[in-house]
Amino acid sequence: MSRFGNLGHRLYQGEVSFDFVGRRKLWYSLSGVIVVLAGIGLAMGLHLGVEFKGGAIYTVTKPGVTLSQAQEAANKVTHDSSARVQTTDKGAVRIQIGTDKQASASQAITTLATELKIPADKVSDQITAQVIGPSWGHEISQKAITGLVIFMILVTIYLAIAFEWRMAVAALVSLVHDLLITIGVYALVGFEVTPGTVIGFLTILGYSLYDTVVVFDTVRENTKDITKQNKHTFSEAANLGLNQTLVRSINTTVVALLPVAALLFIGGGLLGAGTLNDISLALFIGLAAGAYSSICVATPFYAQLKEATPEMRALTKKVLARRAADAKAAAAAAPAEATAKH
């Protein structure tokens, strides 16, 4: 850890630097490939939960019921294997059946009770039903989309006021990038999209925005009155700010990913708490994508937008002219120094 801390100090002082901004074409290409794969996943379609498409959720609290037993019982209701069965964080079994496969709630409960050998006098205690109509699911979907659009608009307005419109555009591109990747991965792995998933999406957008704003704040400090000097271009100053916050971004991401990984791999995988997968996968992929985009997408794209302005183009010419003059002077002085040594 001491070596890592020393690296952070050297990055902050500019003694060591990774040229993230200068390699923006590489990051754009990499992001393009990932987004295309995510697009393929979206084209295949998202696996929407019953909260969005309608259906019924049956919760079985009988002790000792296994997932395989519950799945076999659910198959008797749907006459196929389309029912989704998972455990809850309270040890119960959750059975989801879509509208197209749904018998009446009373018939489904009777079949489940028979297959799971639940006594008639305990059915009402050990099997509960929640029926969700398609119209309610459509309303929830519309609210989720509306919330996302409002979030994006507010973010853009805030960044445009607090920083400038180019930073707002770069941050918005970064957020859309993270959202596309996370949703695409969800589609590719076939995880079910639930209200918990939507919460996870909004959470990772907030995290990605936070990380991007921290980097942007450092970049703004480094590029203040930059046109008054002729040693560094805007991209070079922005890259220095990015390197100064690099270790902090890595540390924050790792610390955030550890508990999420525990939820996803231990809670959802080893312990079988399937309901944890709804939010944990969105958080895990989104946090990783957010850290990547704040470093490799947002700042390089902002620098590219800024370099296109007349002031920064003039600064770049001035910096390159000075470097050419310094190089010419150094080349002219080299023979004289060699003669003096002899």
Image (spheres, grey):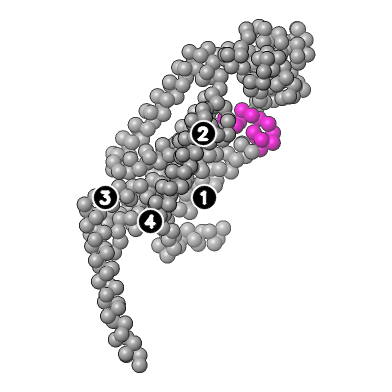
In the rendering, at what x and y percent does residue 326 appear?
27, 72
On screen, residue 334 versus residue 10, left or right, reads left
Asked whether the beta carbons under mark 2 and mark 1 sit within 8 Å of each other, the answer is: no
Q: Element type at marker 2? A: helix
Query: At numbered mark 3, what does the secondary structure look like: helix, strand or loop?
Result: loop
Which quadrant: the C terminus? bottom left
Question: CA gap, disc 3 to disc 2?
Answer: 35 Å
As drawn, 208 above or below 105: below
Q: Earlier in the sequence, mark 3 or mark 2?
A: 2
Alpha carbon distance from label 2 to label 4 = 31 Å
**Residue 340 lies in quadrant:** bottom left
Res. 207 visible in picture: no
The residue located at (37%, 32%) in the rendering is 152
Is residue 272 depicted above or below 32 in this figure? above
Q: Badge 2 is on which residue?
A: 41
Which of disc 1 and disc 2 is earlier in sequence? 2
The rendered magenta stretch, by its main secondary structure, is classed as: helix
Amino acid found under the numbered disc labelled 4: Gly
Q: CA distance from mark 3 to mark 4?
A: 15 Å
Mark 1 to mark 4: distance in Å? 24 Å
Mark 2 or 1: in front is 2
Query: Are the residues flagged by discs 3 and 2 in contact, CB closer than 8 Å?
Result: no
Question: Which quadrant, please, contains the N terminus?
Answer: bottom right
Residues 196 and 256: in front is 196
Quickly name the residue at label 1: 251
Q: Of marks 2 and 4, which one's residue comes earlier in the chain?
A: 4
The residue most toward the bottom is 342
Q: CA distance from mark 3 to mark 1?
A: 33 Å
Read off the residue under disc 4. 22
Residue 272 in magenta stretch: yes
Residue 16, horizontal then vertical, whole percent: 44, 63
Magenta part of the chain: 266-278
